[in-house]
Image (spheres, rainbow, N blue to C red):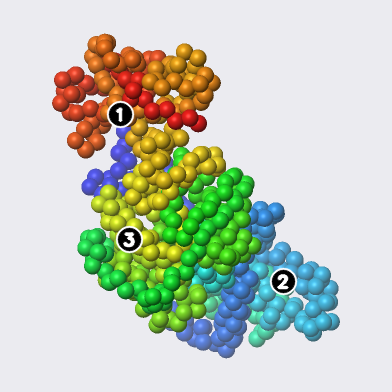
């Protein structure tokens, strides 16, 4: 069998059945270009290109193509954004209209323009009577024709780039107080610059080479509408050598544009993340230790209340409807950990408070102000998404100063405040690095500094530590805890980490299907979790069931559980069993355990100095036991080992649900 990879290079070798047609396709495309090069009169090239007719046509072509590019930017950029970001009826039809000039014969496009904007067209008489504008047989008509056929290249290129950008960047900018127009100008366009540049270059090149629509709609008047392609057409009849020279000029311009793009037109919609060439992330440098944070100055940064001045306090009241159905009240300085299984509505809750989702609506009051009717950028609600969403085209300092600049703080003062916040979070020495040169922990600290710098009324953190390793997570958690202690608003943190919930939060809000299942201090949730998911998150076995008349608990997933304190018959409850309370035996035990089931070991996992053993039971739900390595060795445990599981009735804690 033919090898598909060449030795030593790792590159795929094309099969002969595909390589031959591909080579024929390349030859087919290359032959006309070679024909132009071979028939060019190189000695007369300068004479041909500097003749009065050619120079006049060249100047007109440049004038028309740049005007067409300008019109395409003014009209096409907003259209591309609408197609990429907004869902509306008829979107498929609008996109088809954008693509139509790319597949329509240019002469047919010229006829359509004539019937739409000509003197006897739909709008032509109105334009002439109202403004005195006559487009056919005028330079403006040539501009209109070039724009008609070239603008789709800009729209399609930019739409693809925008569609590949995560909306979290724009949403984060809005949460920092930036209006939609400011977000578009300061975040969207800079991040979409490669796609915009590629589309603009292709648009200009297509407008420069436009022929069919121009000659049909605007005519072929020297000095008025006779562009270079039309000049080539005329020269071909009387001076074919000169026509070849001008064709070579257009060929060189087109090839230069494509080479300059370097595949951006077909290379996808990569986001600008500051990665080094070759696709590897630039070296971010070592992760700073926690010491700089502890040694940070205690003085508030510029812009914060002066010593002795009361910190603004913003209590929270929210009534959330839609997918989420809950009421939330919290005093200033409260940190609430929001937990629950996937799909419980945690992120939806945050986005409802931001005003960014149609799935849920929040009636929101922050302090004395009802912000329900305000757009996201006027609510004073800062958001840190899971990835941080640092703007890749800005340095850490400029990212942190963004919200302050939006509030109208002078540039110098905003940068001083931003630098102070970065210093407080231990990343001040990285102020001039862009996000692509920051490690995960460094980037999250910058994101936190950016959210805290504008003094928001409400702070929302969506799994801010999820992507970090354990050491970095501990450092950032310490930093976050120290700065939340002086925050004058309410902070909501979505997390799946019980350590974060216990160490950072004053309350734990447990959600299930968009509704509040439990809202209590961390110690209460830890002792009496009302959700199987939370119990398992805390490392407990959680068995839902219903109390029976004989004093046992009939488990939802099968089997019965003997308990020390029976509940009234019919009461629904959650049995919480610590893994350390589950004993394992190779033979059926006698004596004190009152719950015994046979089962099979399915997985053994090391957790610190102990082992967690997953046992699949024959007549009850699966259980996790925690034992010492010595006990596992004595029992000769391995995957597939038959065992008996024992649980004392006194080790079962019941939580009514």
Q: Residue at x 63, y 67 (%)?
A: 149
N-terminal-most mark, 3 or 2:
2
Q: For the residues marked 3 and 2, what is the alpha-carbon distance in whole angstroms? A: 71 Å
Q: Residue at x 69, y 80 (%)?
A: 140
Residue found at the very far bottom of the displayed protein? 52
| Numbered tag placed on residue 216 in the rendering | 2
Residue 471: percent from left, percent from top? 25, 52
Query: Residue 322, relative to residue 632: is it above or below?
Result: below
**Circle 1 residue:** 579
Which of the image's four quarters has the N terminus? top left
Residue 506: percent from left, percent from top? 40, 51
N-terminal-most mark, 3 or 1:
3
In the image, 471 versus 231, the foreground residue is 471
Element at label 1: helix
Q: Residue at x 25, y 64 (%)?
A: 294
| Count of marks, rendered view | 3
Give the quadrant of residue 63.
Answer: bottom right
Q: Residue at x 39, y 20 (%)?
A: 563
Residue 655: percent from left, percent from top? 44, 30
In the image, 99 versus 653, the foreground residue is 653
- Asked if residue 32 can be seen in this view, the reply is no
In the image, 252 versus 480, the foreground residue is 480
Q: For the residues marked 2 and 1, what is the alpha-carbon distance in whole angstroms? A: 82 Å
Element at label 3: helix
Element at label 2: helix
Q: For the residues marked 3 and 1, what is the alpha-carbon distance in whole angstroms? A: 33 Å
N-terminal-most mark, 2 or 1:
2
Query: Residue 135, relative to residue 206: is it above or below?
Result: below
**Circle 3 residue:** 482
| Numbered tag placed on residue 636 in the rendering | none
**Mark 2 touching mark 1, by CB under 8 A?**
no
């Amino acid at each position: 069998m033919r090898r598909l990879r060449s030795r030593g290079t790792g590159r795929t070798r094309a099969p002969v059945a595909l390589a031959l047609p591909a080579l024929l396709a390349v030859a087919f495309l290359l032959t006309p270009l070679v024909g132009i090069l071979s028939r060019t009169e190189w000695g007369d090239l300068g004479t041909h290109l500097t003749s009065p007719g050619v120079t006049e046509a060249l100047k007109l072509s440049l004038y028309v193509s740049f005007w067409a590019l300008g019109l395409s930017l003014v009209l096409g950029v907003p259209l591309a954004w609408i197609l990429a970001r907004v869902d509306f009826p008829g979107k498929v039809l609008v996109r088809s209209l954008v693509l139509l000039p790319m597949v329509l014969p240019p002469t047919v496009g010229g006829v359509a323009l004539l019937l739409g904007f000509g003197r006897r067209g739909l709008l032509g008489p109105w334009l002439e009577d109202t403004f005195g504008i006559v487009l056919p047989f005028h330079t403006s008509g040539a501009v209109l024709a070039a724009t008609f056929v070239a603008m789709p290249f800009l729209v399609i290129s930019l739409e693809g780039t925008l569609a590949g950008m995560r909306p979290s960047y724009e949403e984060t900018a809005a949460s920092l107080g930036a209006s939609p127009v400011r977000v578009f100008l300061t975040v969207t366009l800079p991040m979409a610059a490669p796609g915009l540049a590629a589309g603009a270059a292709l648009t200009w090149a297509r407008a420069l080479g436009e022929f069919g629509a121009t000659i049909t709609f605007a005519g072929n008047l020297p000095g008025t509408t006779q562009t270079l392609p039309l000049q080539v057409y005329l020269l071909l009849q009387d001076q074919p050598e000169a026509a070849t020279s001008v064709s070579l000029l257009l060929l060189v311009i087109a090839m230069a544009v494509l080479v300059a793009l370097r595949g951006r037109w077909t290379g996808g919609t990569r986001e600008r993340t500051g990665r080094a060439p070759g696709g590897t992330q630039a070296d971010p440098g070592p992760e700073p230790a926690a010491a700089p944070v502890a040694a940070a100055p205690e003085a508030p940064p510029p812009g914060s209340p002066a010593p002795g001045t009361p910190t603004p306090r913003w209590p929270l009241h929210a009534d959330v409807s839609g997918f989420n159905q809950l009421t939330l009240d919290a005093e200033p300085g409260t940190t609430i950990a929001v937990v629950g299984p996937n799909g419980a509505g945690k992120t939806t809750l945050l986005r409802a408070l931001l005003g960014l989702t149609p799935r849920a609506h929040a009636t929101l009051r922050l302090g004395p102000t009802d912000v329900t009717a305000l757009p996201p950028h006027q609510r004073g609600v800062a958001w840190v998404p899971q990835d941080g969403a640092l703007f890749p085209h800005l340095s850490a300092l400029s990212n942190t100063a963004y919200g302050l600049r939006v509030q109208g703080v002078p540039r110098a003062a905003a940068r001083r405040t931003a630098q102070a916040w970065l210093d407080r979070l231990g990343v001040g020495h990285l102020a001039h690095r862009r996000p692509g040169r920051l490690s995960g922990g460094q980037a999250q600290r910058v994101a936190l500094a950016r959210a805290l710098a504008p003094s928001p009324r409400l702070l929302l953190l969506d799994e801010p530590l999820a992507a970090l390793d354990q050491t970095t997570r501990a450092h950032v958690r310490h930093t976050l805890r120290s700065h939340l202690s002086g925050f004058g608003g309410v902070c909501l943190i979505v997390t799946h980490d019980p350590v974060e919930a216990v160490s950072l939060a004053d309350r734990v809000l447990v959600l299930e299907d968009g509704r509040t299942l439990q809202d209590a201090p961390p110690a209460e949730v830890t002792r009496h979790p009302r959700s199987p998911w939370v119990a398992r998150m805390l490392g407990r076995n959680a068995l839902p069931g219903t109390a029976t008349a004989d004093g046992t608990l009939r488990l939802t997933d099968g089997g019965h559980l003997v308990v020390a304190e029976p509940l009234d018959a019919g009461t629904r409850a959650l049995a919480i069993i610590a893994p350390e309370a589950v004993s394992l035996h190779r033979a059926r035990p006698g004596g004190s355990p009152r719950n015994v089931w046979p089962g099979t070991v399915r997985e053994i996992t090391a957790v610190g100095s102990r082992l967690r053993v997953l046992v699949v039971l024959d007549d009850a739900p699966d259980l996790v036991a925690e034992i010492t390595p010595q006990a596992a060795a004595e029992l000769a445990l391995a995957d597939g080992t038959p065992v008996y599981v024992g649980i004392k009735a006194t080790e079962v804690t019941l939580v009514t649900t």
